[in-house]
Amino acid sequence: MNDNRLACEFLDFKLNTPLVLASGIIGTSDTLLYRAACNGAGMVTAKSCGPIPRAGHPNPTVVEFESGLLNAVGLTNPGAEAEVKLLAKARQKLQPLQVPLIASIFAGTVAEFAEVAQIVATSEPDLLELNISCPNVHDDFGTPFAATAESAAAVTESVRQAVTCPVAVKLAPNVPNIARIAAAVVEAGADVITAINAMPGIVIDPVSGKPVLHNKEGGVSGPALKPIALRCVYEIAKVVSVPIIGIGGGSNGQDAAEMLMVGASAVGVGSAIYYRGVSAFRQIGQELIAFMDQNDISSIEALQGKSHR
């Protein structure tokens, strides 16, 4: 898929397409990240890593329901030190394709975020995403840092002082005023906003009456999340001028167009890979071009922020 109409700018990067592999979908394997890039991803995000190895939650961790997916994988990762080696290998493979690599981190305290950021930054990712909003590890970490502007800003400022690479902050949808939180993290030094993480939910087995997931609750993704994500990005775009990676329910080209219209600079693709495979990027890109043709839209820039004009 080499259509110049999908080309766009993001920070200092020139992307072949605004479609971005979202974190947590296919891990940090250099082979899988490279495969996503070869199949039409303009940027790729590795799975979130923390200060120490983490096994995550026992199965079942993912369930499909009528409007999407519910997952509670539980931030499975090998720890920051091991992640650096995986990221370095991935970056080496991605560089010839000119596809930026986004590393993703989580931690339990503000200070820990800075420590993990410093370690992971040694792999020289193009962007460092702070996952302050995972919805299914409340028992382990307590209230997410994304819950308030103050705590979100504290993490952002701590990491900003610890690293020199661009920083993105991934926000949660289940907050009273996501725009206020976005403005606070940008003021604290965020270069990019990623919005949104999954929405907390539960799926019940109607026979036993018990939650299907071992963790009981998990994060809702897929089509059910789309209108929530669109609204969040729309509100954020009104108060910040930094790029936004819009994530949530993007399953086809029209979904991607709508996300760009509400103010996203790039569109995260996650659960669509579950339904359509890693070729989802190429398929969505082709559908986005078709949408642009049908509506006489000449460029991605013409789509971006259209809802605000």
Image (cartoon, helix red, strand yellow):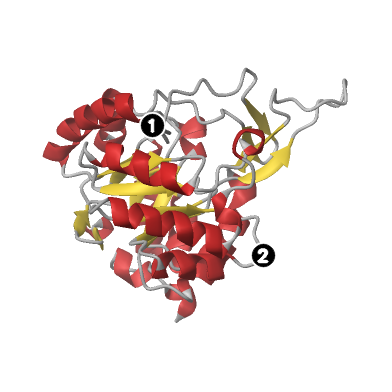
- Kind of residue indicated by mark 1: Val
Q: Is residue 35 left or right of residue 258?
A: left
Q: Is residue 69 left or right of residue 19?
A: right
Q: CA distance from mark 2 to mark 1?
A: 35 Å
Q: Quadrant of the N terminus?
A: top left
Q: What is the x, y in percent for residue 49?
A: 41, 33
In what element is the residue under mark 1?
loop
- Kind of residue indicated by mark 2: Pro
- Residue 309 seen in the current view: yes
Task: From this view, report whether residue 177 is shown above or below residue 139.
Answer: below
Q: Which mark is residue 176?
A: 2
- Foreground pick, 6 / 162: 162
Q: Quadrant of the C terminus?
A: bottom left
Instruction: Count neighbours of disc 2 (C-alpha within 10 A) and say few if under 14, some if 14 to 19, many if 20 or more.
Output: few
In what element is the residue under mark 2?
loop
**Residue furthest out toward the front:** 111
- Residue 296 seen in the current view: no
**Residue furthest out toward the left:** 96
Name which quarter of the figure residue 192 lies in. Answer: bottom left
Instruction: Count neighbours of disc 1 (C-alpha within 10 A) and say few if under 14, some if 14 to 19, many if 20 or more.
Output: many
Q: What is the x, y in percent for residue 170?
A: 47, 52
Residue to which mark 1 is pinned: 278
Question: Quick one: label 2 or label 1, which is nearer the N terminus?
Answer: 2
